[in-house]
């Protein structure tokens, strides 16, 4: 016997239909690279997306075809997300910070048909377009005055928007994102309409993004990174106001926070570090620049001092964990039932962890040496983190084999422990964890403790070969501008924060640390830089 409810496929275009119908006049703001600002509304976003759908049809683009973007955060980019899926196509967001070889691989592997891009990336287009034989249409979002390239407004302006979305099934693909490719070629993650809508519905919950119709979101996380954490989809449900900046300059971001009444923001820890440094330089703090009430922090583990500073400024910190393969939300900083009875220190301690899983995903840890052995949720036993759920990858794009293990569990590559109440705490990446004398040392905990030093801007811990202990940690640090700090100062700072045998055998200072295209510290590149490094003393630990 079947149920007796209406059929209504969970397709992404329903999200925009809802926002345009219920919140048509709710505006969006874009601060462009040239310093100008433009404004639009949810109603106009839908009209422009329908025009783009017509333009794609005129270009011969149809169901399943890939439509790529090479762009920063702005409202025209938002339009393109819905215009691409509106024609039945697959939106493919490309990270412009990748190397040419990676860009070549991604565009050709995806077989993109159309590529929309920002003017600042024209040199990339000019340099590589001859290597991308499948791309037949190039459109510039913001062409300079007098340019002869096809501009976005001109392209969609040739159409009236009097059309309907292409009909698709909820299991059809809608978006393609590639992993950052730190080991081997990037891998494509193909999201479907159903998984994306379910993810969007989960994202608006109080325990996650905590959106309502009054929310003003400034997403610092790029729209090319892990589906911008699902924000362009989730924001339609309560009709939030988006404030976009095509440049991630801390001074510009702080100005937008203040002038546009930003209540929510989302970004990686390095972004917040830059904003703190700017605020310090002008003698202000977060509470002085507007109405920020929720800061979503993800991409890498958030240092304790950062959480403490935000919370002391009255900001709720949602520490989010996820990855491209999980759409990306896996966990977020849900407050427990006894939050109001907890001390401030206990609150900081809890929020410093990665939170609890959203409904729709399940987590478990398995033994690092024996993956068939599931570990207890005791808050003490760390292992390889696995996840499953309706917005978690089953197989990579064009791959013949599933990416998941028996029972549809996906191996995240993270090392973590889970507490009895379900709270997740990441301790490392499986490829970054340091094994010294048969015991595991968390590079993440060392790094977060190190950047708590007032003179340290960034820090990274890596394992160096040791003849007795196999590996020992060294700490590579970047000092804050104008600060004089020594390795001994850092070691002294760490002594009461980590186990004695975790203390690094050496502290080295560099002008900057290598980063991936998504802004994370590249441990692979750092290990390459220190591959010939030898410890002065090999009697440590």
Image (tube, rainbow, N blue to C red):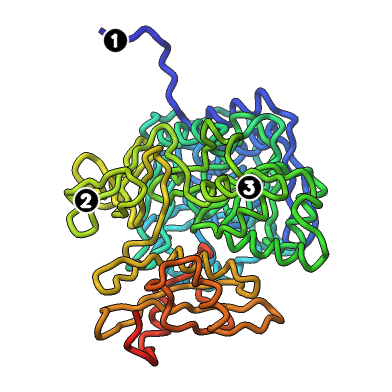
Image coordinates of residue 213 in percent, x first then y, are 68, 29
Q: Is residue 23 left or right of residue 104?
A: right
The residue singled out by tag 3 in the image is 295
Label 1 – label 3 distance at C-alpha: 44 Å
Q: Residue at x 70, y 62 (%)?
A: 276
* Callout 3: SS: strand
Label 3 Cα crowd, 10 Å radius (few <14 / some 14-19 / many 20+): many
Q: Earlier in the sequence, mark 2 or mark 1?
A: 1
Q: Residue at x 35, y 83 (%)?
A: 540
Quarter holding the C terminus is bottom left
Label 2 Cα crowd, 10 Å radius (few <14 / some 14-19 / many 20+): few
The residue singled out by tag 1 in the image is 2
The residue singled out by tag 2 in the image is 400
Q: Residue at x 29, y 84 (%)?
A: 466
Discs 1, 3 touching: Cβ within 8 Å = no
The answer, for residue 160, to whether it is visible in the render is no
- Front-most of residues 437 and 343: 343
Q: Nearer the viewer, mark 2 or mark 1?
A: 1
Image coordinates of residue 144 in percent, x first then y, are 73, 63
**Quadrant housing residue 22:** top right
- Front-most of residues 335 and 389: 335
Quarter holding the N terminus is top left
Discs 3, 2 touching: Cβ within 8 Å = no
How many marks on residues? 3
Q: Nearer the viewer, mark 3 or mark 2?
A: 3
Q: Nearer the viewer, mark 1 or mark 3?
A: 3
Label 2 – label 1 distance at C-alpha: 34 Å
The answer, for residue 225, to whether it is visible in the render is yes
* Callout 2: SS: loop
């Amino acid at each position: 016997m079947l149920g007796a409810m209406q059929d209504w496929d969970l397709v992404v275009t329903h999200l925009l239909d809802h926002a345009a119908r219920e919140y048509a006049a709710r505006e969006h703001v874009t601060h462009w690279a040239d310093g100008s600002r433009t404004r639009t509304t949810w109603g106009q976003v839908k009209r422009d997306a329908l025009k783009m759908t017509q333009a794609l049809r005129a270009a011969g683009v149809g169901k399943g075809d890939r439509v790529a973007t090479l762009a920063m955060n702005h409202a025209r980019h938002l339009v393109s997300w819905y215009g691409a899926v509106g024609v039945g196509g697959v939106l493919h967001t490309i990270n412009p910070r990748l190397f040419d070889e990676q860009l070549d691989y991604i565009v050709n592997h995806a077989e993109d048909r159309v590529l929309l891009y920002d003017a600042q990336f024209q040199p990339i287009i000019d340099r590589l377009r001859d290597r991308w034989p499948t791309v037949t249409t190039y459109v510039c979002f913001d062409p300079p005055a007098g340019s002869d390239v096809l501009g976005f407004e001109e392209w969609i302006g040739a159409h009236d928007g009097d059309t309907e979305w292409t009909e698709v099934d909820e299991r059809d693909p809608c978006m393609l994102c590639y992993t950052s490719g730190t080991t081997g070629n990037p891998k494509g993650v193909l999201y479907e309409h159903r998984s994306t809508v379910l993810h969007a519905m989960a994202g608006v919950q109080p325990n996650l993004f905590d959106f309502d119709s009054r929310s003003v979101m400034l997403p610092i996380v790029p729209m090319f990174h892990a589906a911008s954490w699902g924000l362009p989809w989730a924001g339609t449900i309560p009709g939030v106001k988006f404030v976009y900046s095509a440049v991630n300059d801390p001074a510009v971001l702080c100005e937008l926070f203040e002038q546009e009444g930003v209540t929510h923001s989302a970004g990686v820890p390095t972004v917040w570090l830059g904003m703190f440094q700017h605020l310090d330089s002008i003698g202000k703090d977060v509470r002085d620049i507007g109405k920020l009430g929720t800061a979503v922090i993800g991409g890498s583990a958030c240092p304790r001092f950062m959480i403490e500073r935000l919370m002391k400024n009255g900001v709720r910190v949602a520490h989010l964990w996820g990855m491209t393969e999980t759409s990306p939300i896996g966990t977020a900083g849900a407050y427990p039932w006894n939050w109001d009875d907890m001390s401030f220190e206990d609150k900081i301690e809890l929020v410093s962890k990665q939170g609890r899983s959203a409904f729709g995903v399940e987590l478990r840890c398995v033994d690092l040496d024996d993956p068939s052995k599931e570990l207890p949720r005791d808050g003490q036993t760390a292992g390889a983190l696995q996840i499953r759920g309706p917005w978690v990858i089953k197989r990579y794009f064009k791959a013949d084999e599933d990416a998941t293990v028996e029972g549809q569990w996906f191996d995240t590559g993270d090392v973590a422990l889970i507490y009895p109440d379900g709270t997740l705490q990441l301790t490392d990446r499986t490829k970054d964890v340091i094994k010294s004398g048969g015991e595991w040392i968390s590079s993440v905990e060392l790094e977060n403790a190190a950047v708590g030093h007032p003179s340290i801007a960034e820090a990274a811990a890596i394992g160096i070969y040791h003849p007795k202990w196999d590996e020992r940690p060294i700490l590579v640090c970047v000092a804050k501008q104008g600060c004089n700090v020594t390795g001994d100062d850092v070691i002294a700072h760490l002594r009461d924060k980590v186990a004695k045998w975790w203390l690094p055998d050496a502290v080295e200072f560099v002008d900057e640390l290598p980063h991936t295209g998504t802004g994370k510290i590249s441990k692979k590149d750092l290990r390459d830089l220190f591959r010939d490094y030898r410890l002065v003393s090999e009697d440590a630990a």
